[in-house]
Amino acid sequence: MAATHELMGEGGAVSMEAIAKRAGVSKETLYRWWPSKTSVVLDALAERGQSTIPLPDTGTLRGDLAAFLRSTADSADPATRHLLRAIAAAAANDLDAAAEIRTRFISARRAALNRVLARAATRGEVIASNADTLLDLIYGSLWYRLIFDVGPLDHTWADDIAAAIAPAP
């Protein structure tokens, strides 16, 4: 994973050969753990998201969302954006790739943010049964900006989404 993270951060070619060389292992060793380069990259992206985008607990949904989305924006460096665009393209063109992306990456990120929404439901800030729709709205906005570059992924975006999902009382 460390070798994959390093290569992703450098923005260069991320191949099984490059990962194996950087990690000091054989490609066969990698293929014992991951069936493809996509699998390694997806696991590395999910791990990176878990380590760089903490789950805040500010006591309010608006505060939690703003903090979570600000961290998300901060972690979207050019190399990561490039990889995320590549996996979105793969998902758009291949149903099997889309399923793997949902399983290895998207579901982990949705589950993380769902914990924030579950706390908000406990506090009465949202209706628990609306969580999937709220997740779609939040991540839909993120991916729309990421893929089509219609606006920046920055703190203003993060704060605007938080305010739209959890307006001030």
Image (cartoon, rainbow, N blue to C red):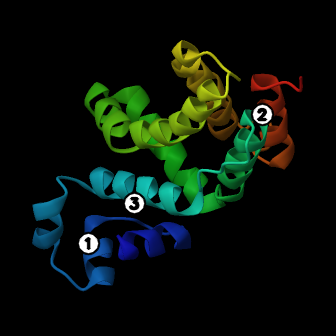
Return the residue nearer the eye: 155 or 113: 113
Few, some or many C-alpha atoms within 10 Å of disc 1 (few <14, some 14-19, many ≥20)? some
Classify the position of the N terminus by image quarter.
Answer: bottom left
- In space, the residues marked 2 and 3 are separated at their CA atoms by 27 Å
Q: Is residue 31 left or right of residue 142?
A: left
**Element under disc 1:** helix
Q: Is residue 78 above or below residue 136?
A: below
| Among the 4 quarters of the image, the one containing residue 92 | top left
Residue labelled with disc 1: 17
Residue labelled with disc 3: 44
- In space, the residues marked 1 and 2 are separated at their CA atoms by 41 Å
Residue 112 x/y as whole percent: 50, 42
Q: Are marks 1 and 2 in contact (CB under 8 Å)?
A: no
Point out the residue furthest to the bottom here. 24
| Among the 4 quarters of the image, the one containing residue 28 | bottom left
Few, some or many C-alpha atoms within 10 Å of disc 2 (few <14, some 14-19, many ≥20)? many
Q: Which of the two discs, 1 and 3, sits closer to the camera? A: 3
Q: Amino acid at mark 1?
A: Glu
Residue labelled with disc 2: 162
Residue 20 x/y as whole percent: 25, 76
Q: Amino acid at mark 3?
A: Ala
Return the residue nearer the eye: 30 or 13: 30
